[in-house]
Image: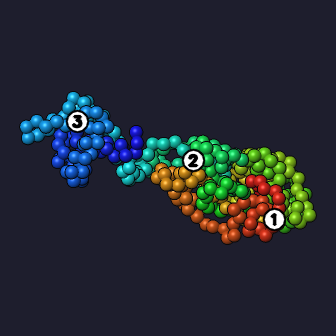
Amino acid sequence: MEAADLGLLVSLDALLQEGSVTGAARRVGLSTPAMSHALARIRERLGDPILVRSGRGMLLTPRAIALKAQVHNVVTEARRTLEPERPFVARELSRTFVVHVTDYVLTILGATVDRLLREEAPQVCVRFVPNTPDDPALLRDHDSDLAVGIYGDLPQEMRSRQLLTDRFVCVVRRGHPVTKNRFTLEEFISLPHLQVAPRGKPGGYLDDVLRDRGVSRTVARAVPYFLTALQLAAETDYLLTISERIARRFAGPLALELLEVPVKLRPYALSLVWHPRLDMDPAHRYLRDLFLRASREEAGDRHDEARTRLDATDPTSGQSRRRRRRARP
């Protein structure tokens, strides 16, 4: 069917519904001569008169009667497609979202996100899955809806928005010998360390900073989860460098002591990341806004000059290295 023939469907529907040229012209806002011309084209295209005169009126042919419902449905669906979208109502939303996060994000924001969804969009399901090196590809390929994390290089088309900031502290068990005196860099590098490594890879921002000072640490245990690292720190003499927000949440329950890191580490920013195909999706915009509201409620204070990545390639760091990885503390 040619593009011009699609326009005839509207005229045909009007003719079939009204049963007259004048009524059809009035229905679609054409002049009577223009509708007569459209009827002539329809008759030629279908090989059927469609409307035949009967006394002072006109009657539909059998072919026209057979087409009436089908044509009307097609035109109605076409018009519905081009109509503005219905106003978004969160309570009516029934959809499953896949969101990449760490257990840190779930600990800080999870309960508030859950409460807001139960109150506002009770039919929504959110599947939280671990972050992966392939988060951008999964977002692009429709496998995921949103990712929360600290990212280095992202594909240029990706969208991101800062969610919250945090800084690093050191954590040891209550009564650890290192808490008795001033905590120095020498003590810091002499102790066996725990490391939170979501992808199990060695190294990270802290190691880069230590290397710049000509020293290094010994990582005795690397674990993929923040909570596991905190529990290990509570039960051993390991030293853990970790995000302050989650450390303070569990300092009391796990009997942990917090210490300042004896080397300067800049704060960092967690970001929401999504693919631009979802920019204008009302449901996705609602989900993004919900995470931002949860962040304002649970982590509204901001750290100045927070890094958007945790390696030496951060453009705000004043350094330039070839290592481009998603780093860990």
Q: Is residue 178 visible?
A: no
User: Separation of disc 3 and disc 2 at Cα?
Assistant: 50 Å
Label 3 crowd bin: few (<14), some (14–19), many (20+), radius 10 Å: many
* Residue that mark 1 sits on: 320
Residue type (three-letter) at the residue carrying disc 3: Ile
- Mark 3 near mark 1, Cβ–Cβ under 8 Å? no
The residue closer to the viewer here, 300 or 22, is 22
User: Separation of disc 2 and disc 1 at Cα?
Assistant: 32 Å
First in sequence, mark 2 or 1: give its number: 2
The residue closer to the viewer here, 142 or 24, is 24
The residue closer to the viewer here, 237 or 34, is 34
Give x and y (percent) for residue 325.
77, 54
User: Separation of disc 3 and disc 1 at Cα?
Assistant: 76 Å
Q: Which numbered mark, 3 or 1, is in the foreground of this view?
A: 3
The circle on residue 50 is: 3
The circle on residue 145 is: 2
- Give the quadrant of the N terminus: top left
Say which residue appears at 61% left-offset and 58% top-offset. Answer: 160
Position above or below: 68 against 236 = above
Residue type (three-letter) at the residue carrying disc 2: Asp
